[in-house]
Image: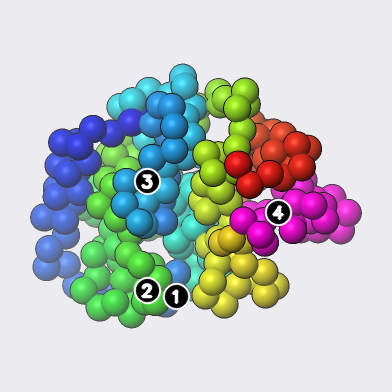
Amino acid sequence: MKFNTTTRIYAALSVALTFIGLHSCVHSPLTGIIDPIDTLVIVDTDTIVLPPLVTCSEDTAYFTNDVLPILVSSCAITGCHDAETHEEGIVLSTWNSIMASDVVKPGDPGDSELFEKLFDSDPEERMPPAPYAPLTAQEIAILNTWVLQGALNNSCDDCDTSDVTYSGIVSTLISAYCTGCHGDVSPSASLSLTSYENVAFSANNGSLMSSLFATDGYSLMPYGSSPLPDCRIEQIQLWVDAGAPNN
């Protein structure tokens, strides 16, 4: 999915103006994704742009492709809104759990508690809370578009498996789906996946793919969330089968 600069800025500003002055709310502990058209793009240091799904509409925010990775990496993490912790009874790891938590009003970001927490002025109570970085304007714009379009459980299916590299595809998928729990801040199972060395180690000892397939005694990852789309798993598998190169 692709957002042009004007759209991103407008969407982010519109959400911000909508929520200025909203009351603060209690919240406790928590970088982002869209699918443009051809290569990895770093919009800023906190925003991750996934490789392309070429049949996606440029004007549509897809839950599976665009929204879920943002929530999994920034909200549904250990100690916050994952299935195990479910802080304040809110779970943000699947579409069903998000809708059941009643934090999103389809078609109405202004009446969605999710956005109220994103703009909380207290760093300890906003989502994600300190020491995690807040969502970027682009990530908020994606969430805003998704809610405006009805907060659908939608996706687009095609992805490119012809040229899979660590820097172009695998690292962005790991950042999007894994480092929320396996980051540098209190990583789950004491495993950080923020470096190539650690990702390659997990790839070479078999634990990475076993976690994605829930085989060999490993729990399905991302934990408590939907599995990665089949094509995304295939991309990682191709990289692993090639010897997990740092390319």
Residue designated by label 4: 200
Residue designated by label 1: 29
Residue extending farthest to the right is 216
**Where is residue 64 shown, x and y percent of the image?**
51, 39
Cα gap from disc 1 to disc 4, whole angstroms? 28 Å
Query: Of the residues tagged 1 and 4, which is closer to the observer?
Result: 4
Mark 4 element type:
helix
Is 78 situated left or right of 233 in this image?
A: left
**Circle 4: residue type:** Ala
Q: Is residue 97 visible?
A: no
**Mark 1 Cα within 10 Å, few/some/many (few <14, many 20+)?**
many
Tell me what residue is drawn at x 41 percent, y 56 percent.
31
**Mark 2 Cα within 10 Å, few/some/many (few <14, many 20+)?**
many
Q: Are the two marked residues, 4 and 3, in contact with CB atoms closer than 8 angstroms?
A: no
Stretch in magenta: 196-224
Cα gap from disc 4 to disc 3, whole angstroms? 22 Å
Tell me what residue is drawn at x 35 percent, y 56 percent.
45
Tell me what residue is drawn at x 65 percent, y 34 percent.
235
Query: Of the residues tagged 3 and 1, which is closer to the observer?
Result: 3
Q: Is residue 123 magenta?
A: no
Q: Earlier in the sequence, mark 4 or mark 3?
A: 3
Cα gap from disc 3 to disc 1, whole angstroms? 25 Å
Quadrant of the image containing the N terminus: top left
Residue designated by label 2: 129
Mark 1 element type:
loop
Res. 214 mark: none
